[in-house]
Amino acid sequence: MTLLSVAQMNSQNDIEANFDVIESLIQQSKAQAAELIVFPENFVCFAAGKQRETAAQFESIQARLELLAHRYQIWIIAGTLPCPFRPDGSVIQDGRVRTVSLCISPEGTEARYDKIHLFDVQVGDAVGGYQESKFFEPGDQVVVAKTPFGHIGLMVCYDLRFPELALTLRQQGANILTAPAAFTYTTGQLHWQLLLQARAMDSQCYVLGAAQQGWHGEHRQTWGHAGITDSRGQLLQSIETEGHGLITSDFDLEQQNQVRLAMPLMQHRKIIHY
């Protein structure tokens, strides 16, 4: 049995203030004996137009997070950070950056996932339209991180809308899917909880949905409702309050195996070409 924590934040553009919240949430998580904490998208800095500025600090921010993981002896899913270089070290030359989610153990960074699906959509909110591909270069690699308590399939926000990614992560051994997110208020209200449960049901994995909540500047509002779903697609816990928060839930690998044995979806799956 392992305890896993999921954070909700209202990150702003002040990196130091955000780090104060990050450390406080880690302390709360450790007080509950959790072995993992998942942070949301843009958790270190939530500031439109400052991606390159924040990306220039990627390595120093990564080092600070590794220090926290070591100090508190906890695994961290570092929501997302903008990064100016690809996994192979090559620098992105066109001014864009990558959206990177890191899996960090008490010994250091264990895995890096670059967000594959970019949010280029029209939304009926104060922002109106979003075009992540203008500022971000998409990743192209599926990543599963091995941990002492299970294999973690790394996802980010808009990735939740693509069941084939969750299924691929399951096929590659994932027991847990992490979904750091900053869903808009409009789309989150419609689909956030539904997507957490659907991806858990599809993949028979736990899904840990860390979320941003509230206003970030004058125009950007996020939905929040950080949630944890089990391998059957049941919502175990959700944060219903505003601002920063934390939820922690048990994860039992043997119980998950029983769910998968009772309904062997992966063995029954057929690829049909219409």
Image (spheres, rainbow, N blue to C red):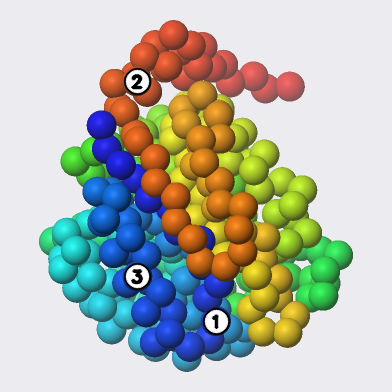
User: Three-letter amino acid code at disc 3?
Assistant: Ser
Residues at discs 2 and 3 in contact (Cβ within 8 Å): no
Q: Earlier in the sequence, mark 3 or mark 1?
A: 1
Q: Nearer the viewer, residue 26 or 195?
A: 26
Residue 12 bears which disc, if any? 1
The quadrant of the image that shows the C terminus is: top right
Residue matched to label 2: 255
In this rendering, is residue 78 above or below 75? Answer: below
Distance between the Cα atoms at labels 2 and 3? 31 Å
* Residue 40 seen by the camera: yes
Q: In this rendering, which labeled residue sits more in front, label 2 or label 3?
A: 3
> Which residue is most to the right?
124
Mark 2 is on which residue type? Answer: Gln
Q: Residues within 10 Å of mark 3 (few under 14, many from 20)?
A: few
Give the alpha-carbon distance from disc 2 to disc 1, as whole Å. 39 Å
Q: Earlier in the sequence, mark 2 or mark 1?
A: 1
Q: In this image, 59 relative to 160: left or right?
A: left
Kindly identify the residue that appears in the image at 28 percent across and 72 percent down.
Answer: 65
Name the residue located 48 percent from the left edge and 88 percent from the top edge.
14
In three-dimensional space, the C-alpha distance between marks 3 and 1, rounded to whole angstroms, equals: 16 Å
Tell me the quarter of the picture where residue 163 sits.
top right
Q: Quadrant of the N terminus?
A: top left
Q: Amino acid at mark 1?
A: Gln
In this figure, which residue is indicated by the disc labeled 3? Answer: 24
Query: Where's residue 213, x and y in %?
Result: 61, 65
Q: Secondary structure at mark 3?
A: helix
Asked which secondary structure carries label 1, the reply is: loop
